[in-house]
Amino acid sequence: MIRLSTAAPDFEPAFQALLHQARETTEQVDDAVAAIIAAVRARGDAALCEFTARFDRMDVTPGQLRIAPEEIDAAVAAVPAALHEALDLAARRIEAFHTAQLPTDLKLTDAEGLTLGMRWTPLDAVGIYVPGGKAAYPSSVLMNAIPARAAGVGRIAMCVPTPGGVLNPLVLAAARRAGVTEIYRVGGAQAVAALAWGTASIAPVDRIVGPGNAYVAAAKRQVFGRVGIDSIAGPSEVVVVAGAANDPRRVAIDLLAQAEHDEAAQSILITDDAGFADAVAEAVTAEIPTLPRAAIAGASWDHHGAIILVRNWDEAASLTDRLAPEHLEVLTPDPAAFFAQVRHAGAAFLGPFCPEAVGDYVAGPNHVLPTGRTARFASGLSVFDFLKRTTWIAADQAALERVGPAAVALAEAEGLQAHGRSIAVRLGNGPAD
Amino acid sequence: MIRLSTAAPDFEPAFQALLHQARETTEQVDDAVAAIIAAVRARGDAALCEFTARFDRMDVTPGQLRIAPEEIDAAVAAVPAALHEALDLAARRIEAFHTAQLPTDLKLTDAEGLTLGMRWTPLDAVGIYVPGGKAAYPSSVLMNAIPARAAGVGRIAMCVPTPGGVLNPLVLAAARRAGVTEIYRVGGAQAVAALAWGTASIAPVDRIVGPGNAYVAAAKRQVFGRVGIDSIAGPSEVVVVAGAANDPRRVAIDLLAQAEHDEAAQSILITDDAGFADAVAEAVTAEIPTLPRAAIAGASWDHHGAIILVRNWDEAASLTDRLAPEHLEVLTPDPAAFFAQVRHAGAAFLGPFCPEAVGDYVAGPNHVLPTGRTARFASGLSVFDFLKRTTWIAADQAALERVGPAAVALAEAEGLQAHGRSIAVRLGNGPAD
């Protein structure tokens, strides 16, 4: 953990170093991924089965790639009732928030008499990638699938590796609750290839979302254009902006809730009180050993954690914008006023009773958020990821005559004669050409 | 040009072939582009000047990379008044439509007492790439820059190659009218690298939009993640759905307005009348030699043009969806009803007085649209490309107590103890840990 103070003469270079600290080691897997995609395009299901045998240590036939309804039934039955209820509360709230996001179509007739519109329609089919192993989170299944369903997507195909053949009951229960229409026991770049290009067993989709390892990320990059993809997620981060009125232990736990995700995760406290900074640092140190994931949380805090002492909340807002954090907890005296000053953050949690974890699971807004300062230009997952727009224009001859001549002039200036002519032949008072 | 009929027994394979016809030869330029980006990152302006000398045959110093205000003044003064007026009409209408697109923030308090919101904010800075040479279109400058300004973006940096040092006055006039804040005479992958990473002369931006050649497209792919990018545009296409009540020559010109863009462009007529199909085909043949771009339009029509005869408009709607065209002209007896049946298209032009060209220049909706069947999942450029969302949550203790226990249960099921604890310590009636 490093400590910075805006009052220190060397603050700016130290903050720059924090801002550009590399937290990810990008594996060079592009060539391996290109070969996997080419194999799936060429040999379809046969290639999927081979890769699954090799990477997930399990033999499957093409007919077994899709997880059968009875297997899902059995897995769902194994989930305790309390967890079903928790999943249901989360699903219901996520669905309500994402339904509220749904945009309305636009239609206007303007002074020149043209009617212009913009219509939103859902994608036909989307693919959801769910990692296996340590990052197999049922909450992520809800967060990826429910917005697609809220948008009106008819077909939601999920791919999840099941190394050694082991199914994760809670992941399957979440998928069923979220309205996933089909689930395949396929992972890695081969899953992305199958979703993008299709095989005999897996029909192609229009967009692929969901987190994954370096192979999955590289595969998504390579199929981008053939299908849509979501952002390539990096390690997670939180900025907690907190004054001395807070309980240091609560703030420490909030920082550690981020740190326990991953050694590359980053937790940053910004405070205006040096004594509070000390108290939080002590509380973090005391709390780490009590966590099951102490090693991960400790490594994250040691290598990437930071406490920044500011002279006032204006400074804190300005630094927050430069960090453009995925998660922002605002525990200042006036959270709403502080949030109004901030421009760049994936999601904000306002006040002392909004730990980030409530947003990770049940609040309703999405927990798939832009990482690594990409909140400068990117947004969390939403219904907008599963909708597209068609603009449209309608005009009668009178309207065309009001705007057409300008279009003809521009078309001719651009050397596009047929463009101009397509308008000119429709102008009653103009030459037919 | 090929002719298909849905009544023919071999229709489906022939339509599939049309659907998957390769119109683009993708150059393998990734390695060259990676080297250019690395050079710009390492050596900044010096690398930009070297690449400009090599690719655009002109010597510039770092101080000359930015086009000076006086040069823009001089160029703008050279544009005839009629074109200024046309640009102004176009700009005003594009601005009005994109301003109407601006979304509203969301805020709701739900049954459990949580307040949830979604706030839209503009990007700080965007880069607009404008190609030189044959594709240097002032209309594209308007279509890329005005949505950014309508969204509230403060800084709009434009890069345009000026081979041999020649400026395009209309492009500069459009940039000034659109509110571009700075213009650089830099093109190719080096321009994308500079916009993404910054140099001493060109401050980095948050998102890069605009069309370009294979090098520009590859560079955008490679900087994706560091900055946002727009879709990688392929060759343009139009589907015209027209009944026999139309003038065959008008429809022919509409098809050719697409074909004259590029030999790889594609124009498709779908009609329910064989005689009308013949008449349009004849009109196209008659019209081509009268066009300045006859060679390009003729090659496009010969290699990629198609006329599809359908038995009814339902078939036409279904085929349109499978083609998911960039542009869709609807000249059927009831254009609005037909459009309501279609799900996938970038932009639609309804009725006999809406040739696509009116949308290319002055109607208001954007002409930067998804190509190559990507309208299945992608949308035209809009204010949404220059905005991002921050979701937010506020709760008091009572609200947290209603939803918190479910979150704790899910966190524990996912093995994320600190997540659960961050909520548990805030629950008044729960254990402090």
Image (cartoon, coloured by chain):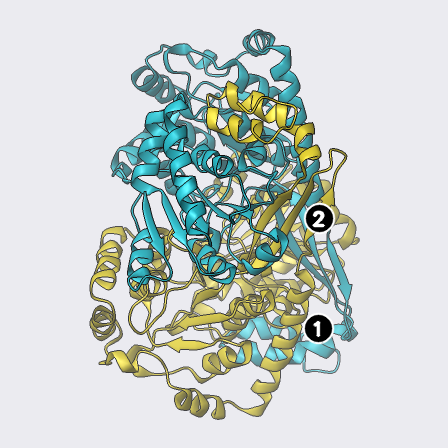
Chain colours: A yellow, B cyan
Asked if residue B279 can be seen in this view, the reply is: yes
- Crowdedness of circle 1 by 10 Å Cα count: few (<14), some, many (20+)? many
Q: Quadrant of residue B392?
A: bottom right
**Residue drawn at x 71%, y 36% as measured from the top left:** B96
Q: How far across and how far down the image is residue A244, in percent?
A: 73, 56
> Which SS class for mark 1?
loop
Q: Is residue A377 above or below residue A363?
A: above
Q: How far across and how far down the image is residue B55, in percent?
A: 31, 19
User: CB under 8 Å between callouts 2 and 1?
Assistant: no
Given residues A77 and A3, the one toward you in this image is A77
Chain of the residue where label 2 is placed in the rendered structure: A
Q: Which residue is mark 1?
A: B426
Label 2, label 1: how many angstroms apart (C-alpha)? 47 Å
Residue B150 appears left or right of A222: right
Chain of the residue where label 1 is placed in the rendered structure: B
Query: Which amino acid, mark 1?
Result: Arg
**Residue drawn at x 67%, y 29% as measured from the top left:** A401
Query: Which amino acid, mark 2?
Result: Lys
Q: Which residue is mark 2?
A: A107
- Crowdedness of circle 2 by 10 Å Cα count: few (<14), some, many (20+)? some
Q: How far across and how far down the image is residue B335, in percent?
A: 60, 51
Q: Is residue B78 above or below residue B124?
A: above
